[in-house]
Image (cartoon, grey):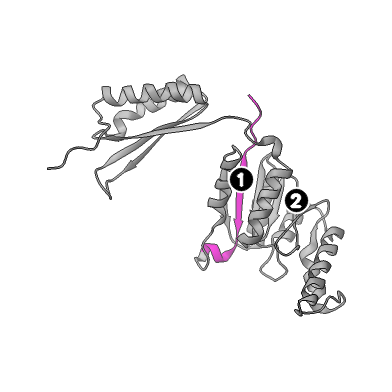
Amino acid sequence: MADIRKIRLIIIGDEILSGRRQDKHFSKMVELLSQRGLLLGGAEFISDDRATIVDTFTRSFATPDVVFCCGGIGATPDDQTRQAAGEALGVPLALHPDAERLIAERCADNERRGQGSGDMSLPENQQRLQMGVFPQGAEIVPNPYNKIPGFFIKDHTFMPGFPVMAWPMMEWTLDNRYRHLHHQVTRVEHSFLVFRLPESRITPALEEIEQRWPNVKAFSLPSMGETGHPHIDLGVKGEPDAAAQALAFLREEVLRLGGQLNPPQTR
């Protein structure tokens, strides 16, 4: 079997943790990965605190994982991601020449629209150039929305927090840097609802599935019946042939143990 890379997501921002903004990146990342036959292996939500970001990146850079990071790459005091990445890697920051060119193009575009000046010597444009200061050795990640790039270093892709910018950058990275990972393994997922069966009674069968079919994961999602009868959403996911065998076994065990596949009749 091919060596499967773990893919993770890191969301940075006090505004997410405080509830001032709602995260949209998690569900989009899952969607984009699913379209390419990939799975999300983990996600973290962390604050803008510099020490917290450095600690998170230090641990993350030590892994072989593919990581997408959203947030904190602007040029205001609460944007600490670029600096924290450099600190975690032990490398200095430097203005990336491609980023400098693209930011200058953005300023020129704004001037043509009557929105500011393209003179890069102006203080506000010098401040904008800070958004192109990346850890030494980084490569740019194109931003089709406004040209101001993100950056890539050591299998970590750093993007803004704005979905309109981050999502195209996610897609570009998946399709240009990691196309070789797409659809390495064919996975399927099957599930069915079970009624009148306690989860504790079916648990041994779930454990047996993972022993008999190592490439299959079994799952159990109980519902308390908020919208109907209490039930369990039971299922398996993994390699198609093995998953089909495991599913048949699971159905047989449910019936043997007294579970029902249809909701009880109400009077």
Q: Position of residue 12 (x, y in %)?
A: 61, 59
Q: Position of residue 29 (x, y in %)?
A: 58, 49
Q: In the rendered view, does 165 fall on the left or right side of 202?
A: right
Q: Is residue 105 above or below residue 232?
A: below
Q: Residues within 10 Å of mark 2 (few under 14, many from 20)?
A: many
Q: Position of residue 98 (x, y in %)?
A: 85, 58
Q: Secondary structure at mark 1?
A: strand
Q: Which residue is mark 2?
A: 152
Q: Secondary structure at mark 2?
A: strand
Q: Position of residue 165 (x, y in %)?
A: 66, 60
Q: Residue at x 66, y 51 (%)?
A: 170
Instruction: Answer whether residue 208 is magenta in the image.
Output: no
Q: Residues within 10 Å of mark 1 (few under 14, many from 20)?
A: some
Q: Is residue 41 visible?
A: no
Q: Quadrant of the N terminus?
A: top right
Front residue of 128/144: it is: 144
Region in magenta: 1-17
Q: Quadrant of the C terminus?
A: top left
- In the image as oriented, which residue stretches furthest toward the left? 267
Q: In the rendered view, does 180 fall on the left or right side of 98?
A: left
Q: Is residue 179 visible?
A: yes
Q: In the rendered view, does 89 fall on the left or right side of 189?
A: right
| Marked residue nearer the N-terminal end (1 or 2) | 1
In which quarter of the view is residue 199 placed?
top left
The residue type indicated by label 1 comes to: Arg
Q: Residue at x 57, y 40 (%)?
A: 39
Q: Residue at x 57, y 30 (%)?
A: 186
The residue type indicated by label 2 comes to: Phe
Q: Mark on residue 8?
A: 1
